[in-house]
Image: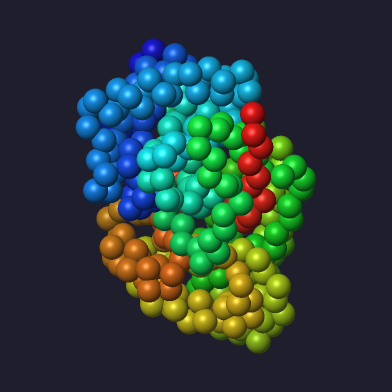
Amino acid sequence: MSVDTKKLQALLKWYMQSIGENLIAVIIVNREGLIIDRIFGASEKQLDEDIVGGVSALVEPVLTRITKEFSSGSFGTGTFDTEEYRLIFCEAGPEAVLVTILDAIAGVDPVFPYAYLAAEKIARIFDGRTVSPVIPKLISEKRINNIEKKVNQLQKIKVQSGEYAFKLILGGDGAVGKTSMVHRFVENEFAKDYKSTIGTSIMKKECKFDGLESLVRFVLWDLAGQAQFKKVRQSYLSNAEAGILAFDVTNPSSFQSIENWHKEIISASPNISLILIGNKIDLVDNRVVSREDGEKTAEKLGIPYIETSAKTGESINDAFRMLALQMIKNYLVGEEI
């Protein structure tokens, strides 16, 4: 089977950057435990070749148990802790398993949203489907530790079953592509004829994840960006739990407005989880706002950043799915097996 190794390695690099300093290594293995690809983190506790071999030897018997428990071939997930390491196993379709090796003191809960998304992308690469290797950096002040460290004990990780509904708002200047992003996400279509939103537009969309016994339902509030609607927006923003701030990478004024939009949204919903999106990256020749500028603003605001194209669909689903995973990560539970 032919696999796009360059895209696989690019994905691993994005995943490594997302996890941060507690990451020691990431290994993609097949069902027999043989290494397909790997990458090492920035931790001082680097794995040398001998240790990699040892970890691989550990992976195989754990994978045997994983395979018995997670026969779905989708995204079953588990952890295995040793004195030195914390290992997260996440199925990446029927062909591969993503193994994330963390420092022994690392919390595993914040890693799962990244692991699920990376696993899905790996499965798409193996299937030969179109996929972007980019994984946006999630920033969250809510650090939870539901998954207790248990040495030499395999735990199956599950999201508490059920349906979760969240109000999601989209903010940003007019004509940055908010409505197009929503339509691309909800209907997988792109409307060539632009029509400005009057007040707000409300749509619904469900997010399903293979192997997760839960469903996330977003009620999407697409807010009009024009100044004349500012007085009524506060009522729309109230009680929003998730949100997207969007600007047009070809329109510098829309980028300069982001901080004002951030203040307006936070004042109405202080506990909202936000992500910053730079849209219209398909207009390469007209681009004036760089990725670096977008990342700096996102870092200043303490929120993730991702670039999209509503026209081509690039990374649109990733943005919404990352928000969904971020919202449900508080419902992770560990189950001994």
- The reply to whether residue 270 is visible in this rendering is yes
Residue at left offset 56%, top offset 70% = 171
Residue at left offset 61%, top offset 72% = 271
146 or 242, which lies in front?
Answer: 146
Residue 312 lies left or right of residue 286; in this view the side is right
Q: Position of residue 275 (x, y in %)?
A: 50, 62
Say which quadrant the N terminus sits in.
Answer: top left
Q: Position of residue 261 (x, y in %)?
A: 51, 78
In the rendered view, tell whether residue 309 sits above or below residue 67. Answer: below
Residue 322 lies left or right of residue 166; in this view the side is left
Q: Position of residue 51 (x, y in %)?
A: 28, 29
Residue at left offset 32%, top offset 68% = 296
Image-quadrant location for residue 242: bottom right
37 or 253, which lies in front?
Answer: 37
In the rendered view, tell whether residue 249 sits above or below residue 149. Answer: below
Q: Give the color scheme: rainbow, by chain, secondary structure or one colour.
A: rainbow
Q: Position of residue 2 (x, y in %)?
A: 35, 16
Residue at left offset 41%, top offset 24% = 58
- The reply to whether residue 212 is visible in this rendering is no
70 or 240, which lies in front?
Answer: 70
